Amino acid sequence: MDQYWPHHAPAKSPFHFPVLPAGASAHVSLAGIQPDAGLKIIQDIIASATKSLWIEMYLFDNDHVAQMLLSQKAAHPGLDLRLLYHQPLLPPSLDPTGTQRFPAWAMPNKAIRTDGQPVSLHHAKFILVDADVPGKAKAYIMTANFTAQALGGNRAGYANREYIICDTDPNDIALLKAIFLADQTGRPLPTIPDTSNLIVADINALSLLPLLLRTAKHSLAIQVEYLNDPPGEGALNLKQIILHSARSGVAVQLMLPPLSPQPLGAPSADNNETYRILSPTVAVNVTPQYFMHAKMIIADQQLAFVGSPNLSHQSLHYSREVGIMISNKNVVASLLATFNADWKYAQARASKIHHP
């Protein structure tokens, strides 16, 4: 997922100085937290669509979700259903003949970077419901894929920590619709206003996510699957930003997935170099209750980010990623409460591992 780094990054203007957006507030809510929300949250989202349902998704192997889409299309024949997928590995219900002859509404993602080259990963995960219906249009910006592990847990008993944000801002929905259409047709992305709360790679994620880390004055709470920018020319120095924050008195807490499978066969992520560099200056926990697939940052308990990008060279330079900055007090408080509960559980688990 984060093992491939092309050699040339998109050029950025040296005269553009990014400013953090204020964060979405009035139009944003926390739709679901996984694994508690399970499949029902996706079922409810799909069932709410009567005019249009546009989905951009990275991994999609959950046949229950596929059957939900087919049922909704059957119940509403005029439904404008569109799915952009990363690669043709879709559930059996969408490929009953086993010949990769998918429904006409399922299309390969053709996203390109700002330099015109194809993105290496179509990693965004968002859903648009009735986007052109005033008063009903909703966007769901997710960390979760359409997989069993992401949506409540798989048969092996593994489940992810994931977040699903609901956004009803008409400007955000219009911009997400434009991003979807660009990725559907292989056209360049639209311009993103500096005031937009949407974070998109490879447009503004490269500047705004490091800036969010830098501007924290008191605390940083981070849950992410990968934090591993490579050394050398073009490196983001994300680890150094976090180290500098911790050394400057910012209370940094970083939650990562297990560094190696425990027990053998359990999901893990290779953040070993990150762990070695940051510990013990930064409080890093790698013993979460759930696999840490979430990509979430909370700065100073006031401004949060939730979305698809990892804190990595791969995500911010070369993938299609979508996320959102959030300042809504209730949403930030819920995200922080979940983080704190996860951290407490992980600390207790780490203590048992080291002192059985």
Image (spheres, rainbow, N blue to C red):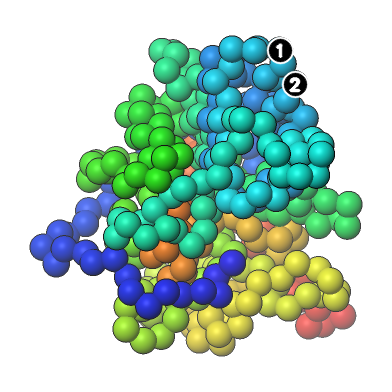
Could you tell me residue 34's position as x and y percent?
69, 45
Foreground: 78 or 140? Answer: 78
Q: Residue at x 71, y 44 (%)?
A: 100
Amino acid found under the numbered disc labelled 1: Ala
Amino acid found under the numbered disc labelled 2: Ser
C-alpha separation, residue under disc 1 versus residue under disc 2: 6 Å
| Quadrant including the C terminus | bottom right
Foreground: 331 or 179? Answer: 179
Residue reaching furthest to the left: 15
Could you tell me residue 257's position as x and y percent?
66, 68
- On the rendered structure, is 134 left or right of 2? left
- On the rendered structure, is 314 left or right of 55? left
Pointer 1 with pointer 2, Cβ within 8 A = yes
Q: Quadrant of residue 197?
A: top left
Q: Residue at x 15, y 59 (%)?
A: 16
Q: In terms of secondary structure, where does tag 1 sit?
A: helix
- Provide the residue designation for mark 1: 75
Q: Residue at x 36, y 24 (%)?
A: 170
Foreground: 316 or 92? Answer: 92
- Provide the residue designation for mark 2: 71
Using the image, tell me which numbered label, if any, was put on residue 94. Answer: none
* Residue density around tag 2, few if under 14, some if 14–19, many if 20 or more, within 10 Å: some
- On the rendered structure, is 353 left or right of 258? right
Q: Residue at x 48, y 44 (%)?
A: 332
* Residue density around tag 1, few if under 14, some if 14–19, many if 20 or more, within 10 Å: few
Residue 305 appears in the rendering? no
Q: In terms of secondary structure, where does tag 2 sit?
A: helix
Foreground: 104 or 38? Answer: 104
